[in-house]
């Protein structure tokens, strides 16, 4: 967890088939960003970088 002025953010590297981060965050309404990892990979990335914050 990274604590910043605008909130706390959680970072995780997960397997490409992991869909647990896609679920509802109600009633908090948390933003989730999912992108390919490693970041410099060209083509199908083997993992995903997940970031959550609120």
Image (cartoon, helix red, strand yellow):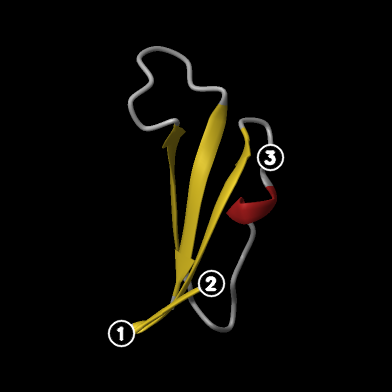
- Nearest to N terminus: mark 1 or mark 2: 2
Mark 2: secondary structure: loop
| Residue at image point 35% right, 14% down | 42
Q: Nearer the viewer, mark 1 or mark 3?
A: 1
Name the residue that disc number 2 marks: 1
**Cα–Cα span, label 1 and label 3:** 28 Å
Q: Are marks 1 and 2 in contact (CB under 8 Å)?
A: no
- Nearest to N terminus: mark 1 or mark 3: 1
| Residue at image point 64% right, 58% down | 23
Q: Is residue 50 left or right of residue 40?
A: right
The circle drawn on residue 18 is 3
Q: In terms of image quadrants, where is residue 2?
A: bottom left
Mark 1: secondary structure: loop
| Residue at image point 46% right, 33% down | 37
Residue 38, horizontal then vertical, whole percent: 44, 30
**Cα–Cα span, label 1 and label 2:** 13 Å
């Amino acid at each position: 967890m990274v604590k910043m002025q605008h909130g706390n953010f959680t970072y995780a590297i997960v397997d490409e088939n992991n869909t647990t981060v896609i679920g509802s965050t109600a009633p908090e309404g948390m933003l989730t960003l999912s992108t390919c990892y490693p970041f410099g990979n060209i083509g199908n990335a083997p993992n995903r970088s997940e970031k959550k914050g609120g």
